[in-house]
Image (cartoon, rainbow, N blue to C red):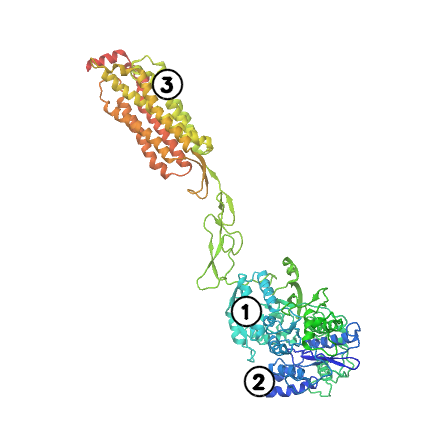
Amino acid sequence: MSGMFLNGEMNSLDLHVWLETEAAFEKLVPSVADVEARLEAIVASQNTDMSMLSRDIRRLHFGYFQQLQALFFAIEEINRNENILPNITLGYHWYDSCGVMPVNMAATLQVLSGDKLAIPNYRCLHNAPLSGFIGSSSSTLSIAVGHLLGLYKYPQISYYSTSSLLSDRRKFPSFFRTVPSDIFQSKGLAKLVLHFNWRWVGLLGVDNDYGQQGIQLVKQEIIKSGACVAFTESILTSRPDRNAVHIVKVMKESTARVVIIFATGLDLIPILTEMMRENIKDKIFVASEGWSVTSLQTMRSFSRLLFGTIGLAFYNGLIPGFQKFLNNIHPNMTVGGGLVRTFWEEAFNCSMDGNLESQGKFCTGGERLDAIKNSYNDVSNLRVSYNIYTAVHVLAKAMTDLRKCLSGEGPFHQGSCTQIQHFSPWQILYYVKKVRVPLSNEMELYFDENGDPPAVYDIVNWQLSADNTIRHVKVGSYDTTTSSGQRFTINSSLLLWATEDNQIPTSACTESCPPGFRQASIRGQPACCFQCVPCPQGEISNHTDSNDCLKCPWNQWSNPKKTRCLQKPTDFLSYDDPMGATLTGASIFSSFIPTFILRLFIRYKSTPIVKANNYFLSCLLLVLLSSCFLSSLVFIGYPHTEKCLLRQVTFGLVFTLCVSCILAKTIMVVFAFMATRPGSSMRKWTNPQVSYAIIFTCSLLQFILCISWLSLAPPYQQYNVENQPTLIILECNEGSPIAFWTMLGYLFLLAFISFIVAFLARRLPDSFNEARFITFTMLAFLSVWISYIPASLSAQGKYTVAMEIFAILSSSWALVICMFFPKCFIILFRPDMNSREYLIRKDRKR
């Protein structure tokens, strides 16, 4: 932390800014000497390895030294600009806490007291009001300091603390920061992981508020988005090796290839060292902003291991004139001279005090910083330095707004203002809350109700340059201030991965399920560990890693690979179908046989055999039989609604007429025999009108039934997708199954009565007695239709229709063969039996 004070013409304003870094410096300003002296006692009481701390304290990192210079540059820039705070000079105190909590708190109390001796609730310097604090960098230290400063209402502006805990205004009412909260970073890292379809990741976090809160937040976002966490491990800062052996063992045994790390570069070095020792090179790191653009020189030795790392980094701002300022420092400077000399020796590998044992040459002071290139004077990635620079300008802008307050229009009691030389912490805090500072990207920095600025991140990719050094290349951005569709952008063409073909690495517990399969969870395993199950018939998955299969519409069916739905073919008994064509030909051919027999009967109508078999009824029956054969054609072809209405009714009426004719012929045979008895009164029943009446009466009942059927529940066309899921069966729904079976049952009844009457009359002594033929005819007819019932119930689709057509043709052929073929045989081949002499001779034998 560092402190600043401001001098007017005769007054001084002490603006304290705490600049805490992860690195430690060998020598700081004199006020830190007491802090370092107290550090040894604190460390001894906590049993901490002093040698390790001493090493860290005296190690100078150029990147962190640049951050300190950003503080100096911002104050100098403000003091030179008369438009910001005219006639007022900012001053400062700065301290290095070495990342140690007791040192951090001791320095804070020292700043508040204004003297080397920390006295709570007392301010020893009265000539320069304390305006605010900048720091700490660590979230844990900022939390500790924030509790203290919140009591006094001193503004605290951190340039590196990102823990979401610090957004709680009840606990930290005076805390602000120029970096986004980890809440936004966690969402950004989750989006980054999902963008590359990494669904199986590990989490590492340093064991402080920053690391633990960070990995918990990103874990929630990852799980919420559907990905899974393979392992969660903590980097233990209390151990010299940071628990590296255990962590690397877990990483090695895990199938997760991607690891998200919330830590700093220093905490990561032991982990990387152990990974090199174990020769683990297949991991991809996703970096939090804590180390995504670290400038630690030690990282160069892990360049092959870190190649391909991707992560979020703070916005990279521009500070005009800063590079010239960096190159103008000199060992003879008054401010921080001891620290500059240490930097000079390390930068030029020389000695300022003449000790050549550790360095190979003397430092002349004439060395030029612009002649060398290191992380100190590299201004291409001014991320943390820019945040420090902005934090100083936030305080300066707040004081400028306070100074411009007009009496009577002020924000305090009764519109009052306060004087720049004498203000209270809570008054400057008011202006910090309202401040708006322009940034180099044409945006403004302001604070929301939680003290957080707008969240803007760069997405950086670690790439190897030609000399095997690491470059941090910006490949995208995550900006929450833009519209939702443009918040997360990545230029994939700029990405480089540590793979042979530069393809995006994969990280999954289970390999992706291809289209045509769905994910099925495994008991006791995370959701990302699954097995691939093929979609059932009629369902598809048309993209990778489908959670569920989609059912095809009723008129579509899945292709063999189950990746898309195809239109189902329609199926019906058509004329183009081989079976339909065969049945059509058979029906037409069969219809000619009754016609041929009719012509034969007409030609031989005067012969005894034709006369004895009721010529007119026989002719009517032959015409109806020809119609029976042709009625089967109504069942073939596209089943329009009109055809559905006609086909069963046509079949029922035509066959009823046929069976009624046969019944009339049978009854007429009985009446004719009874009329031959002497004195019989039955002769009047042998009149042809009786037979016509029988036919009309029997057919009328069937006609009434069919008309009722068509009126109340007519047949209609339907698409059947139940019997055969792969087909759309076009068929006729009979409308009322009861009506259909009643119609068929009535037909059976007529046939059965004809069969019984003919069976009883089969032995009547009459020439050319038809009763025997009618008996066989009805027996064959009934057998066909009784067999049709189970056959039709077991058939499906067009085969049901074909079964009925076959029954129609078979029963019609049974009528033709049994009723007329014997007569045709006598007419054509035994004319001697078709003569009056044969009949007389036969009667005499009787």
Amino acid type indicated by mark 2: Asp
Q: Which sits earlier in the primary sequence, circle 2 or circle 3?
A: 2
Q: Nearer the viewer, mark 2 or mark 1?
A: 1
- Neighbor class of circle 1 (other Cα within 10 Å; few <14, some 14-19, many 20+) is some
Nearer to us in this view, 634 or 280 = 634
- Neighbor class of circle 2 (other Cα within 10 Å; few <14, some 14-19, many 20+) is few
Q: Which residue is mark 1?
A: 216
Amino acid type indicated by mark 1: Gln
Q: CA distance from mark 2 to mark 1?
A: 30 Å
Residue 60 at x, y percent in the picture: 67, 80
**SS class, disc 2:** loop
Q: Which sits earlier in the primary sequence, circle 2 or circle 1?
A: 2
**Quadrant of the snapshot with the C terminus:** top left
Nearer to us in this view, 205 or 608 = 205
Q: Nearer the viewer, mark 2 or mark 3?
A: 2
Residue 828 in which image quadrant: top left
Q: Which residue is mark 3?
A: 598
**Quadrant of the snapshot with the N terminus:** bottom right
Amino acid type indicated by mark 3: Leu
